[in-house]
Amino acid sequence: MSATKGRTSSFTRNVLSASSSQTPGIKCGPNGTFFVSSGISDLDKILGGGIPLGSLVMVMEDAEAPHHMLLLRNFMSQGLVQDQPLLYASPSKDPRGFLGTLPCPSSKDDKLRNHDPQQEKGLRIAWQYKKYFGENQQSFDGHRGSKQEFCNDFDLRKPLERHFFSGQRVDCVSVKDSPNLVALQDRCTTFLAQFPRNDGSISSVGRIAIQSLCAPQCTHSNMEWDVLSFISYLKSMLWSANAVAVVTFPPSLLSESFCKRWQHMADILLSVRAIPDDDKELAKLLTGYQDMVGFLNVHKVARTNTQVPLILEATTFSIKLQKRRFLVLECLNQAPIDGSSGASYGTSGSCSGSSKTGTLEF
C-alpha cells in the first residue's frame, strides 16, 4: 500500500514550523501563520506580529506629503538586509536610483546613544517577574533575542550600503511609459514563481514594492478597470507564494467607487496623513505634537487561518521621527484640559474632591 501524505488540522502541531522559523526574517505565529517584518517594529506589533506571508498591503497616500515613502523605504530595506529578493516598481524613469535613498540599519552604538532611561526604569522592575515565566516561552510579538533577525531599527540619515542592492536579487521596473500593466504583471508572475508555497520548509521570501500605482504621470492612470484587474491578479498570485507585497496609491485621483473596490482587495489597509505645522488647536489637544510628522490610520488587518478578529487598542497612531533619525509609531495621547503638563492623572482631580494634592485619595 502506497504511503499517504499525513494530514494536518488545527488541532495538530505543525512540525515544519520549527524549521521555517529558523529562516532569517521569518517568524512563526499562531494558527500556522508566518510573518515577515514591515521594517518598523511598532507597526509589526500593531499588525499582530508582522505581515503574514501571502498578504497584500495597500497604503493610501496623502496628496500633501509623501509620508507613504517612509513606510515603503523601511519595508524595502528590511528585505534587502535579510537577503530577501525584491521587485520594485515605480512611475519614475530610473527606479534603481531610488534604492540609494533607502535607510541603513542602525548599529549597537547608535541604540546605546538613543537609550531611553524611562524604559530602562521599567525594565528594572519587569525583570523580577521573569521567574514566573518559562525560560523557553515564545512570544508571537517577538522576543529580544530574535529582534535583530526579524526587524531592524533603521537610521533615516544614513543611506543603505550599496552591496545590499547591487546584486542580482533586486529587480526594478519603470511603469511610466508603459501603455498598460501587462509588462508589470509578467514581471510579477516571473518573480513570484521563485517562491512557491509547498509543503516543505520556507527557504526564502520575496518582497514586492509598488510605488504610487495609477500615478498621473503614467499612461495607464485612467484605466481603472485594468488596474483593478491587476490588483486582483496580484492578490491571487500572492496567496500561493511565499511573498508579500506593499502597494501605495493616491486615493484622491480615483473615483469613489473604484477607491472602495481597491480598499476591499487589500489584506492590510493603511493610510497616512500629514500634519500642518501651524495647527494650534491640534497642538493643544495632543501631547508631543511638536515631534509628530503625520498620522497612520489602520483600516484593515489581515486574518489568516482564523475567524477571530484582531481587536486593536487604537486605529490612529502618530508618526514620529525620534531624534530625527528613527521612525516611531505611538498611540495618540490627549493633553490635559487644564493645560498642565499632564504628568499624572492625579493633578487633575481626586476622589476626595481636593485638587491640591497630587495623589488620589480614597
Image (cartoon, helix red, strand yellow):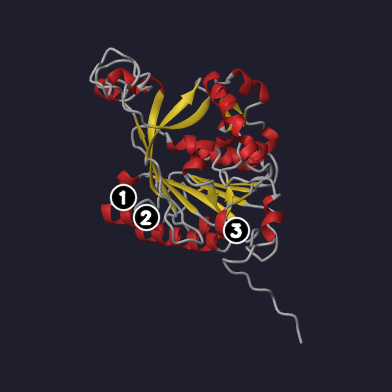
User: To which residue does mark 2 refer?
Assistant: 262
**Element at label 2:** helix
Would you say the residues marked 1 and 3 are in contact, meaning their CB atoms lie under 8 Å apart?
no
- Which residue extends farthest top? 356
Mark 1 or 3, which is nearer the eye?
3
Q: How crowded is mark 3: few (under 14 residues within 10 Å), some or many (20 or more)?
A: many
Label located before the other in sequence (1 or 3): 3
Label located before the other in sequence (2 or 3): 3
Of the pair 4 and 348, the residue shown nearer to us: 348
Reply above or below: 163 against 241.
above
User: To which residue does mark 1 refer?
Assistant: 254
**Element at label 1:** loop
x and y percent of residue 181 in the render? 46, 57
Reply above or below: 109 against 196.
above
Callout 2 amino acid: Trp
Callout 3 amino acid: Leu
The N terminus sits in image quarter: bottom right
What separation in Å lies between label 1 and label 2 (alpha carbons)?
10 Å
User: To which residue does mark 3 refer?
Assistant: 192
**Element at label 3:** helix
Say if residue 68 shows up in the picture.
yes
